[in-house]
Amino acid sequence: MLTTFGQYIGGKVVTSILAALLIGGGIWFWNHPEQLATIWRTLQYVLVWLGITVALPWATFFVTPWVVSKDSNAAAGLMLLGYTVADFVVAWWLIGSLRGLGTLSWMVLLLGFLAAAVYNFKVCEYQAQQAEGGY
């Protein structure tokens, strides 16, 4: 019974906090519409970058079997480096430049590039397995 009561009160507290944050955010953006526009523009850039980053290794699916046929770690590394550099170039193009970025922006960019590199590796690994007839 005490657990049920605690969950009930906890749920009410969390709901109240979320409602206060939602109302406070609504008031803030009502008074500062330029910041809302900035957030939406940033979100659009992130979605475009993610779309290109996700589609690039699949759109160039023919490169992976060619690199696998070379049987060279250097060729595979250059392929992955090429994908990561392409992701960086797209981000650079969307941002405009890297001047004026704060610490958080740099951390997010670096985390995004690391995640893109891991994603490129996993996609290329999958494509290489498919090219060799593995499942």
Image (cartoon, grey):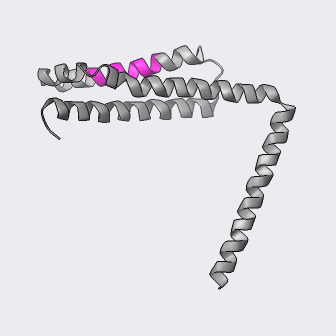
The question of residue 93 being in magenta is answered with no
The answer to whether residue 102 is above or below residue 135 is above
Which one is nearer the viewer's eye here, 27 or 91?
A: 27
Q: Of helix, strand and loop, which mostly describes the magenta segment?
A: helix
The answer to whether residue 19 is above or below residue 6 is above
The answer to whether residue 82 is above or below residue 102 is above
- Please tell me which residue is depicted at 19% across the width and 21% down the height of the picture: 67
Quarter holding the N terminus is: bottom right
The question of residue 88 being in magenta is answered with yes
How many numbered tags mark residues here?
Answer: 0
Q: Position of residue 4 (x, y in %)?
A: 65, 79
- Please tell me which residue is depicted at 77% across the width and 60% down the height of the picture: 16
Q: Position of residue 95 (x, y in %)?
A: 59, 18
Query: Would you say 125 lies left or right of 104 here?
Result: left
Which span is picked out in magenta? 78-89
- Residue that protrudes farthest toward the bottom in the picture: 1
